[in-house]
Amino acid sequence: MSASAFERIVEQVRELSGGRCRLLAVSKLQPAAAMRDLHRRGQQDFGENYVQEALGKMHELADLPLRWHLIGPLQSNKASLAASRFDWVHSVDRLKLVPLLAQGRQPVASALNVLIQVNIDQEASKQGCAPAQISGLADEIATHPLLRLRGLMAIPDPQRDPVVAFARMAQLQRSLTERHPQVDTLSMGMSADYPQAIAAGATLVRLGTALFGARS
Ligand SMILES: *Cc1c(COP(=O)(O)O)cnc(C)c1O
């Protein structure tokens, strides 16, 4: 994409959110060179869906001070590896993952930033916990010094009006903050709906195609 198109989106996110929302560049299936290009224009946070693909790009881009976010589904057998290599994991949705992430983080010694993924439209095939499971997961995450609970993440059902889901997520985030006041991140909104997500209170929008164009 052209430099001015990237800068337009950065500026739009800043204006719509009054500076409260940051941009996560979703780079799955995009080449490392495109990420290097965005970094040169000021982008530091990148989201990847697949652990193996991300490891390859971490190697290629090891000279850059990037922050790596795992936003795809997390399998238990990849949890330890993911915890040792990423800076953020957005897809924690079951208790079983929590001790695996904490153990995997040990060699790094700084805390892993963790978001709880919520299946906000209760889709049968979707990752994410039910809203009623958030507080139990949050309490468990908070017991581990190497995990830092930052907030919630969701991917609304593309067949429905996302505004309803975004409003419910904002409400869930407010409830979570009462019990865990350090929570500061609400990850929601993608290329098709990020203005609505920001209006509802998103603090991190995850943009792939709007930044990089279509994935091959
Ligand atoms: C692919 C993906 C995105 C980005 O989607 P776009 O529509 O390309 O912006 C955001 N979040 C998650 C979890 C994704 O898997």
Image (cartoon, helix red, strand yellow):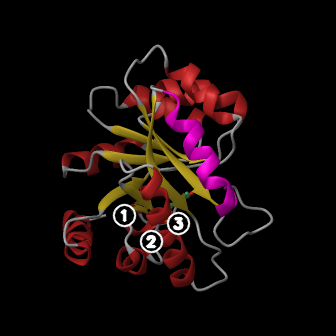
Residue at mark 2: C-beta within 8 A of ligand 1:
yes
Q: What residue span does the magenta drawing correspond to? A: 128-144
The crowding category of the residue bearing disc 2, from other C-alpha atoms within 10 Å (few below 14, some 14 to 19, many at least 20), is: some
The crowding category of the residue bearing disc 1, from other C-alpha atoms within 10 Å (few below 14, some 14 to 19, many at least 20), is: many
User: Distance between the Cα atoms at labels 1 and 3?
Assistant: 29 Å
Q: How many numbered tags mark residues here?
A: 3
Question: Which residue corresponds to mark 3?
Answer: 172
Per the picture, the main secondary structure of the magenta-coloured stretch is helix
Kind of residue sitting beneath label 3: Leu
Q: Position of residue 39 (x, y in %)?
A: 25, 46
Q: Is residue 133 left or right of residue 166?
A: right
User: Distance between the Cα atoms at labels 2 and 1?
Assistant: 8 Å
Q: Position of residue 132 (x, y in %)?
A: 68, 60
Look at the picture and state if 68 lies above or below 55: below
The quadrant the C terminus occupies is bottom right
Q: Is residue 105 left or right of residue 87?
A: right
The quadrant the N terminus occupies is bottom left
Question: What element does badge 3 sit on?
Answer: helix
Kind of residue sitting beneath label 1: Leu
